[in-house]
Image (spheres, rainbow, N blue to C red):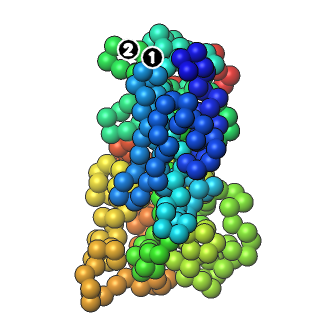
Amino acid sequence: MADQDLTPLLVDALGKRIDDPAAARLAGVIGKKPFKNATPNNSPLYLVNRKLGLEIGTDIKIDNRSYWPYRKEGRVWITWVSFAFLYPNYQGSLPAGFDWQMDDASLRARFESRVEGVIRVRLFLLPPPREGLRTTAQLGSDGRPTHLYMTVVRERSFATIHTGSPPEHNVEYGFFAAWCALNGILREGRLEAGQFDAIQSRRITPLTFLSTALGGLLWENDVKPEFDSFCHAYMNRLIEPEEASHPRDAEAIFGDLNYFRKPGEPLTQDSWVNFDRIAPRYTQRLEQWRRGELSSTVDFPAEATKPANAVA
C-alpha cells in the first residue's frame, strides 16, 4: 500500500456514493472500514489515515445541481464521498507544478490565488484532477503548504427552497429572485423567453417564479459573474455593515422574516405589492456596493492574483 499511488483511487471515488465500488475500493486500500451514511445532524463523516496523510469526508448536502436535492432511499440518506484533505506526508501524485516545498512567491508565480473567508486565508487554485473537482492549497505559519483540499465543485447559494419546507418560509427569497430577473442580474440564457415574460408581466408571483422557472435555486451559476460576490454577501449576511444585508432589510420593511414568525403572527404574503415595497432596497444596496460603501466580509477580489506567467 505504501508504494501505491492513491490519487487515482481518490479521484475516482470523489463524487461517488459511498456504496459505489470506487468508494469501497478506496476505503479498503487505506485500511479502514467502509464509509458510513451521514445524516443531517451527523455530517460530514471522515475516514482518516494519518500515516498516509489522507483524510476523506462525506456529506449528504452538496451545493451542486448534480447532487441536489439531498434525499433518502428508504430510511437511509444518500451519502457522497465529497472531499479530501491531503497533508505533506501524502505520497500520492500531486497536481501538476505543485510540491510541498513551494513558498508563497513560488506558488503565486505558478498558480492563481485569492483571499477568502473571515480570517482572510489565501488559497491557491491548483489544476483540478478531473472535471467536476476543485483543488486548493493553503499556506501555514511556516510559509509552506499545510494541506491540499480536493472537493466536488460546489456553487455558492443565495436562495434555496429545500424539499418539504413550508412555502411561506421562502417568500423573501422569491422577492430577491424576481428582482434579479428583472434587473439583469441573471446570466444570459438562464430563462426561456416565456419564463421572463411571465415574471415581467407579473402573471406569476415572485415565489412561484423562484420555485418553477429557477427550480427553487438561486445559486452562483444562475447570476452573471460580476454579481456573484454581491449576491453572496448580501443574501448570507456576509456584508459590511451587516445592517445592509438581506435579512436585516427584510426585517426593517416587513417586521421580520416569515421563517422566524411565531404561530399566529401575520405573514408577509407572496405578492407584487410586497415586492414593490422591498425591491427599491435591493437596488439601493447594489448601488452602494458599486460605490464601495458596502463590502464583503469573505471575498477580497483586490487581493486576488494571477500567476506571473499568465496571459492577460
Kindly identify the amino acid type of the residue bearing the numbered disc 1.
Answer: Asn
Residue to which mark 1 is pinned = 89
- The answer to which image quadrant residue 134 occupies is top right
For the residue carrying disc 1, how many other residues have a C-alpha within 10 Å: few (<14), some (14-19), or many (20+)? Answer: few
For the residue carrying disc 2, how many other residues have a C-alpha within 10 Å: few (<14), some (14-19), or many (20+)? Answer: few
Percent across and percent down for residue 67 are 59, 56
Q: Which element type, helix, strand or loop, lies under badge 1? A: loop
Q: Nearer the viewer, residue 150 or 204?
A: 150
Write the residue at 28% across / 79% down: 261
Kindly identify the amino acid type of the residue bearing the numbered disc 2.
Answer: Gly
**Mark 2 / mark 1, whichever is N-terminal:** 1
Q: Which element type, helix, strand or loop, lies under badge 2? A: loop
Q: Does 66 appear above or below 297?
A: below
- The answer to which image quadrant residue 279 occupies is bottom left
Quarter of the picture containing the C terminus is top right
Q: Is residue 226 visible?
A: no
Percent across and percent down for residue 249 are 33, 66
Write the residue at 29% across / 71% down: 251
Image-based side of 115 in relation to 127, left or right = left
Q: Which mark is residue 280?
A: none
Q: Does 82 appear above or below 185?
A: above
Determine whether label 2 and label 1 are within 8 Å by CB.
Answer: no
Percent across and percent down for residue 175 are 48, 73
Percent across and percent down for residue 214 are 61, 68
Residue to which mark 2 is pinned = 143
Q: Does 292 appear above or below 170?
A: above
Residue mark closest to the camera, 2 vs 1? 1
